[in-house]
Image (cartoon, rainbow, N blue to C red):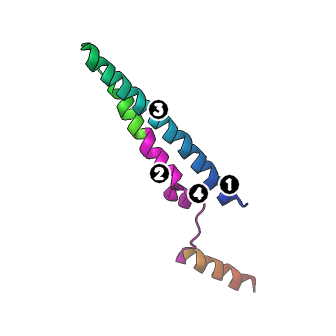
């Protein structure tokens, strides 16, 4: 395995953990929500768990897909036209 594959695997593991955390927060929110509804408690609902649960869930799904933007930034594959011209100039100077 090269470094790109290892980095991609690490991103997917982070994604799996984030999805688990997001689902846990969402489950906690819905349990609290329905428990408060049964008891008619006038306490503020834990909307922060809903927000964080959705955030972790969507971020985790992005990482599970391989986080293509992060991977492209970390391991650029395309050589730009300017870089190619610079390489050609260096080779011409050396010859």
Specify the quadrant that holds the C terminus.
bottom right
Q: Which of the two discs, 2 and 4, labels the residue nearer the N terminus?
A: 2
Label 1 neighbourhood size at 10 Å, few (<14), some (14-19), many (20+)? few
Residue 91 shown left or right of residue 31 in the figure: right
Query: Residue 61's spot in the image, x, y percent?
Result: 47, 49
Label 2 neighbourhood size at 10 Å, few (<14), some (14-19), many (20+)? some
Q: Which of the two discs, 1 and 4, labels the residue nearer the N terminus?
A: 1
Q: Which of the two discs, 3 and 1, labels the residue nearer the N terminus?
A: 1
The alpha-carbon separation of the residues under discs 1 and 2 comes to 17 Å
- Please report the bounds of the magenta region as a residue range: 56-81
Residue receiving disc 3? 24
Residue receiving disc 1? 6
Q: How many marks?
A: 4
Q: Nearer the viewer, mark 3 or mark 1?
A: 3
Which numbered marker is on residue 62? Answer: 2
- Report the residue at 53% width, 46% height from top: 15
Q: Which of the two discs, 1 and 2, labels the residue nearer the N terminus?
A: 1
């Amino acid at each position: 395995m090269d470094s790109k594959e290892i980095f991609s695997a690490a991103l997917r593991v982070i994604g799996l953990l984030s999805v688990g955390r997001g689902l846990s927060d969402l489950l906690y929110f819905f349990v609290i929500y329905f428990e408060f509804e049964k008891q008619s408690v006038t306490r503020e609902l834990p909307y922060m768990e809903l927000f964080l649960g959705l955030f972790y869930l969507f971020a985790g799904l992005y990482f599970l897909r391989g986080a293509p933007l992060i991977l492209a930034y970390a391991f650029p594959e395309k050589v730009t036209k300017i870089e190619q011209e610079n390489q050609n100039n260096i080779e011409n100077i050396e010859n």
